[in-house]
């Protein structure tokens, strides 16, 4: 699971096995450890939800994903989902959840569990 934060946008990319795990178990979590603390980020399936949402509590970012979106996600061609979530300040937080594709350029990162890039066909 990869996280990217830029301004008021939060993007999470997931591999094939992570999409399958999210659809079957309903929860994924990763952490980045620092000297005295860790940044934790998670995906959690939300029964009867209607769109992506997120919160940040006690150093943990959680993106909530409606169960209807992930139920068939491992077997369909849907690349991802997005939403705009209102914030307590003017504006909104843009949320993106995407399947992780194999990069078209050279990278040292292990991409064996990523989806085939549609632009490579």
Image (tube, helix red, strand yellow):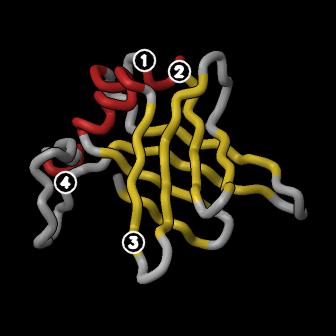
What number is the disc on residue 71? Answer: 1
Q: How far apart in space, not on screen, are marks 3 and 1 (Cα)?
A: 31 Å
- Precedes in sequence: disc 4 or disc 3: 3
Q: Which residue is mark 3?
A: 33
Mark 3 / mark 1, whichever is N-terminal: 3
Q: Relative to 18, is 115 on the left or the right?
A: left
Q: Residue at x 48, y 47 (%)?
A: 42
Judging by the rendered image, the residue that carries numbered circle 2 is 67
Return the x and y of residue 81 as percentages of the image width and height.
52, 38
Q: What residue occupies the far bottom of the structure in this picture?
A: 35
Q: Residue 104: percent from the left, percent from the top?
A: 17, 62
Q: Are marks 1 and 4 in contact (CB under 8 Å)?
A: no
Q: Is residue 60 left or right of residue 24?
A: right
Q: Quadrant of the C terminus?
A: top left
CA–CA distance in space, label 2 to label 1: 6 Å
Q: Residue at x 60, y 18 (%)?
A: 47
Horizontal and vertical percent for residue 119? 22, 50
């Amino acid at each position: 699971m990869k996280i990217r934060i830029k301004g008021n946008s939060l993007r999470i990319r997931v591999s094939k096995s992570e999409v399958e795990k999210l659809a079957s178990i309903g929860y994924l979590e990763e952490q980045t450890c620092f000297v005295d603390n860790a940044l934790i980020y998670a995906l959690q399936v939300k029964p009867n939800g209607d769109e992506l949402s997120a919160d940040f509590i006690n150093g943990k970012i959680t993106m909530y994903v409606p169960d209807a979106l992930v139920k068939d996600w491992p077997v369909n061609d849907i690349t991802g989902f997005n939403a705009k979530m209102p914030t307590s300040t003017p504006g909104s937080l843009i949320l993106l959840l995407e399947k992780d594709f194999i990069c078209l350029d050279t990278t040292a990162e292990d991409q064996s569990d990523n989806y085939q890039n549609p632009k490579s066909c």
